[in-house]
Image (cartoon, rainbow, N blue to C red):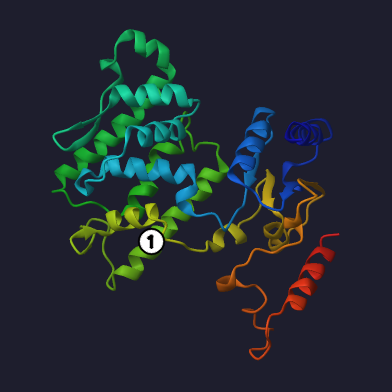
Amino acid sequence: MLDWVAAEIAGLVHDQGVPPGEIAVLAPFLTGALRFSLTNRLANLGVPVRSHRPSRALREEPATGCLLTLAALCHPEWRQFPTGADVAYALMQAIEAMDLVRAHLLAEIVYRIRDGVPALLPFDEIEPEMQERITFVLGGRYEGLRSWVSAHTARQRRSGGRPAELDHFLSRLFGELLSQPGYGFHADYDAGEITANLIESVRKFRQVMIREPVDAGDAAPAVGGTSLGQEYVEMVRDGVVAAQYIRSWERQPEDAVLLAPAYTFLMNNRPVDHQFWLDVGSTGWWERLNQPLTHPYVLSRRWSPDTKWTDAAEVAARRSTWASAS
């Protein structure tokens, strides 16, 4: 089914000249496996694609894992040493065309904990046979990443060990390294959006935790002896931090095929010329997710405080919603 959908979309874009932004692929639920499979198929056919899943937690995004792993490598004072698997997945996300096998091989060779500090070895110190297996193209990109991490930690030591705020660090990491040609976020719409959401989330967390503004050059304030950056990373990995990102709803649509859950597409209120509906026999098309803390009807201004939300009201809302989609 996914092969057919990808081929049909590619035909619309390449043969009929349909703008990718006028195509949407909808499903009752957009799982990570479905998004990954369809995104890869469309990318291989030269079709730009983006997805919008506002209910997905930040920690579930591979791009978030990459950013936080690199942040831990650049902040050894946190004492949060990534595992070899974490480093391998980060390399796979950060370096363009780096597959999982080479990423694991490279991580096993170059990642070390020396004197209680995580370190990445230079590519030229690897045995020639292993260099050829990884390829010199990927090795050069890895060396660029390693040099950036090394330069950041050296600059931090020269400044007296006072780290910049985590959101400032992530902005530099994205702008100076990951968004550049040869690296994984360069042409990835979703990775850029996730990075922006992560930076916004860190900034909101910092603004809540401190009352007075802190300059970028000042040391990040601590919470119980832990820096705010370290505290935030721990909370994300524990699944505590959550936020709604208005930017993802308000942004101008890119010229890319949209992958989204059905309700998200309807709430976006943006029509397209071509829709592909997946798994049409699922009851998920009819059932709305039970989200009492963000209920779109009861918490709206039009809802009377004295009125109860009943099963009849739920059925009526479902019919009204899907009538607007037809």
Quick check: 168 above or below 149?
A: below
Task: Tell me where residue 305 sits by quadrant.
Answer: bottom right
Residue appearing at x 36%, y 13% in the figure = 131
| 133 horizontally vs 108: left or right | right
Residue appearing at x 43%, y 21% in the figure = 102
Q: What residue sits right under mark 1 in the picture?
A: 203
Task: Tell me where residue 145 sits by quadrant.
Answer: top left
Find residue 104 and report its horizontal and vertical position in percent.
Answer: 39, 25
Depth check, front residue: 173 or 222: 222
Task: Tell me where residue 74 sits by quadrant.
Answer: top left
Residue appearing at x 48%, y 48% in the figure = 60
Find residue 58 and report its horizontal and vertical position in percent.
Answer: 47, 53
Find residue 156 and report its horizontal and vertical position in percent.
Answer: 20, 44
Depth check, front residue: 272 or 42: 42
Residue appearing at x 50%, y 36% in the figure = 186
| 169 horizontally vs 24: left or right | left
Depth check, front residue: 121 or 30: 30
Q: Which part of the image, by quadrant, shows the C terminus?
A: bottom right
Depth check, front residue: 242 or 280: 280
Q: Which part of the image, by quadrant, shows the N terminus?
A: top right
User: Label 1 is placed on what type of residue?
Assistant: Arg
Q: The residue tagged with tag 1: helix, strand or loop? A: helix
| 264 horizontally vs 64: left or right | right
Quick check: 9 above or below 319?
A: above
Quick check: 31 above or below 12?
A: below
Find residue 88 and report its horizontal and vertical position in percent.
Answer: 39, 31
